[in-house]
Image (cartoon, coloured by chain):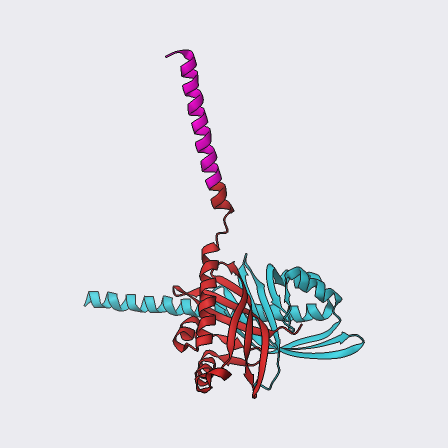
Amino acid sequence: MRMSAAIFILFFLVCGVAERRSGAQSEDIDSARAKILALENVWNRAESAGDLKALGALFDNDLTYVEYDGTLFSKAEVLSRDKSKHLQQVVTQMTKVQFFDDTAIVNGIYRAKEFKKGRLIYEEGRFTDTWVYKDSNWICIAAQATPIVQASGK
Amino acid sequence: MSSHSKFSTVRSFVAQAAVATLLICSIAVNVIGQDPNVATKEKIVTYENLWAAALKARDLKAIDSILDTSVLLINDDGSIQTKGDFLSTTKQGFSQPTALQTQMILESLTVKVFGTTAIAIGILRVKGFENGKPFLRRDHFIDTWKYKDGAWKIVGTEATPILH
């Protein structure tokens, strides 16, 4: 009888710890998701404002970046391109963040307004950004954009 | 034993010790200088080739084992698919005559490793028919691989046509 009571208490203790732990994990994921979305917003604003310092802080030194026309860029090349770009506005929507331990994959749609050769150009594409948690920070290691050719229902 | 021969024995010992030290140092430098991610990079290259072969052969079982359950695939026309959607459209491709089926060739591949995450960057040459018309295009792709539950899986993938 005493034994079964002990097992009963132990069972509740284990359940309590497990519940608290999963609660903490989901809280961690919620907080990480908020951080990633905030960083994505910083990226949009920094691109529109041509803030290369802010952009540089978001990207890993070994960043891989595939532009919407299929060009492959390094971090230095992206920053150099952004320096000469005349972006008016970048907005993202339908953004989804998925976590795989210390890695986050962000998918979404972006819309950009840019002055090119005296004309206002509109660009719309689907993007995938890969972030890793490194040295206590989330940092972008890969980014890619693809033009949306056909209505894909999203 | 003369002092000369003693000296020569000592000299020979010193020489042997020096050679041994140099050998150990060169092995240590080699080991330290080696890319610690070589084995992972080699694995990802193998998996990328399997992935390309599975796509080419429309091998649903292989595709299923390579893609993570929650992966979202961004195709080169900007459309998005879940793993289920992708397996379903790949299966539908079986009904097409062989001559009309899409062909894919992996042109180039680079792998970067970040702990238990790997990024594979490459160019895929895609040839096929769209709306009855033949097409040939080259796509730049990035596949994100994650080591989870004892295996490497694709957790993110996107392809962009090279327009220049």
B1 and B65: which is toward the camera: B1
Residue at left offset 51%, top offset 59%:
B113
A48 and B146: which is toward the camera: B146
Q: Position of residue B73 (x, y in %)?
A: 51, 76
Q: How many marks?
A: 0
Which shade of the palette goes to chain A? Answer: cyan
Q: Position of residue A49 (x, y in %)?
A: 73, 69
In magenta stretch: residue A149: no
A23 and B164: which is toward the camera: B164
Which shade of the palette goes to chain B? Answer: red
Q: Position of residue A46 (x, y in %)?
A: 69, 67
Q: Residue A112: tell me if it is visible.
A: yes
Q: Residue furthest front?
A: B99
Could you tell whether A63 is left or right of A9 in the image? Answer: right
Q: Position of residue A38 (x, y in %)?
A: 61, 70
Give the position of the N terminus of chain B as an image quadrant: top left
Residue at left offset 56%, top offset 85%:
B130
Could you tell whether B43 is left or right of A94 in the image? Answer: left
Residue at left offset 71%, top offset 62%:
A80
Could you tell whether B132 is left or right of A124 in the image? Answer: left
| Quarter of the rendering containing residue B53 | bottom left
Residue at left offset 69%, top offset 70%:
A45
Magenta segment: B1-27
